[in-house]
Image (spheres, rainbow, N blue to C red):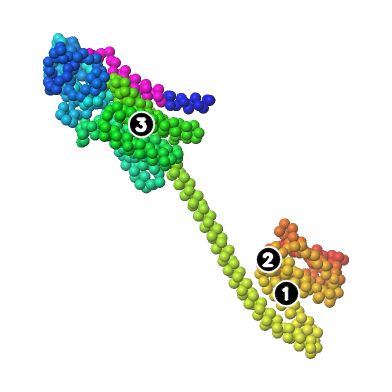
Amino acid sequence: MIKLIKVLLIPLGLCFLLLQAILYIYQSLDQPDVLRLKEASFVQSDAMYPPPFLLDKVEKRSLPDNWLKSMSGFGGSGWYQIHFPRQKQGGHVWGLFIPRANMNLAVFLNGHEVANSGHFSEPLSRNWARPLYYTIPAGLLSQHANTLHIHLKSYADEAGGLSQLLMGSQDTLLPLYQMRDFIQIDLAKVTFFLNIFAGCLALFLWNLMRSKSMYAWFAVICFSSCIFILNHFALELPISRNIWHYSVYVSIGWYACSLLMFTLHFLQRSHEMFERSLVIYMLISSVIILTLQNIFVALVWHIGSLAMASYACILLFRSWLHSNESAELVLFIGMLSTWILGFHDWYTRLTLQQFSSPVLMHLGPPMILVAISWILMVRFSQAMKKTEQFQAELIQRVEHVTLKLNKEHQRVQVLLQQEAKEGERSRIMKDLHDGLGSYLMSAHSIARMQKLDQGIQQALNDALFFLRTSIDALGSEDADLSSVLGTFRYRIEPQLKACAIKLHWYMDDISEYYLSSEHKLHLIRIIQEAIANVIKHSGASELHISTKLMDDVISLSVKDNGCGISGDQSGHGLKNMRERIEMMGGSLTINALPSSGTHLLFML
């Protein structure tokens, strides 16, 4: 409920401000030191100079005088005669301010022409919404009574007539005229050129983005409003009066239609069938108005225009209630303002009160233009921010992808190097197996057959063992550590049995723990060196070898029950084992007592 009250305060407050502005324009004419001429005599005449006002032809008229009301839409020429008493100028320049006259007039004071607003031949100069101000020459004011004649000419059914006349000091009247002229004429001119520029810009944007029909309808808003805005200040017409007059009515209808179309596309609620039907209705109605050229048909046409503008306002208001978007609120305020101004002009014409009020419809398009321009600028700013964010994200993604590609490239290079190494290793292993291995096997067989010295046979046997363990460790990069150690156990266990040493072997599942072929060979050589020391120096009967994996750390334990080792017994074997384990990034711990054997603990 509180939100609804706040929402209603915005349009109601806007209506209040607009009405206050209109009332200010009305009340500004009520100046205490201004002579207001409200009564006149009227006679129909085509004379170019004041005719005789015969009693049988003179009509009494009250100003403002609307010919639609007083003469049922009379079209032609007429003369007003107004008497006013002698005025004391007091050194001030006097002026005559005519807020509104339709269509063209000439002013005579005491039989002398003071000024005219244009030519009286067809087509007439169009002053229907233009305020007029004329300076009264001091010598023309009589010291007694004065007579003012107003020659007025207008078209039939075009609301000919004359507003009240104001006479007084120029210091008082001229600011009133300038304010009215600024509102009626100057603002109309500025709005006209702004709409031309905005319409061309909208067409340019639509040409770039044909899918965005919103820009096309925005261009129609601008160009259609230019026609009825031009009608406010254009004095001479390049086409016939009737075609122009009813083209203005048609432009007002298209203005309201394009506002509705723009709103539908802006809210993304466009419906092809509805839009097509509305355009067909507008085209048929436009042809009817231009063909019939009937003022009452045009006024009914205005009702349809107000209905379309009302529907656009309702759509925006309801959408804003649901989304709470500031852009929708701004556009709603602009359209509501235009609707109020358009309703004001339509209502004053319908009630024949237009000569007592200014024309305000031309003030609506700049409000729409400002609202839509603000929305487009906000959306452009948001699009620029999104573009900048996208560029930043794109740069970040490119850097991320570049980093991944670099890593992938490095990985591929490593794989290529490993593949090359693997190929070279395989070739070397084949050469060792097929070449050196064959020769050693042959030599070993010959030594056994010829019963050569046992030392020679043992040396050949050790060479074969060394070659086989090397091939086991270096033979394949893909072989896991468990398989390599298992093969080594298979190779070493017969030697230990031959030396009367019982092997106790325990191994965790370390198949997932990766070691390069070089490091596998180092590990085999470390275990091999440790076993050789046990066989040669310890005199042990049992040997415990175990591997455990805890938190990505492998511990390799080699423990015997031999005589142990003292500090002065460490030679090249232990030194080589320590160097190898350090090359692998591990450590070696030696625990030895003369009575309990030796315990080597390797940590990887």
Corner quadrant of residue 28: top left
Residue occupying the point 79% across, 88% down? 449
Residue occupying the point 27% across, 13% down? 32
Corner quadrant of residue 151: top left
Query: At label 3, which amino acid type do we have?
Result: Ser
Q: Position of residue 587 (x, y in %)?
A: 72, 63
Judging by the rendered image, the residue that carries numbered circle 3 is 305
Provide the residue span drawn in magenta: 14-39
Q: Nearer the viewer, residue 217 or 546?
A: 217
Q: Which mark is residue 515?
A: 2
Query: At label 1, which amino acid type do we have?
Result: Thr
Q: Does the image show residue 192?
A: no
- Residue 407 lies within the magenta run: no
Rounded to the nearest angstrom, the CA distance separating label 2 from label 3 is 85 Å
Judging by the rendered image, the residue that carries numbered circle 1 is 469
Q: Is residue 533 above or below residue 148?
A: below
Q: Looking at the image, is mark 3 or mark 1 nearer the viewer?
A: 3
- For mark 2, does the 10 Å Cα neighbourhood hold few (<14), some (14 to 19), or many (20 or more) residues? some
Q: Position of residue 176 (x, y in %)?
A: 27, 21
Q: Secondary structure at mark 2?
A: loop
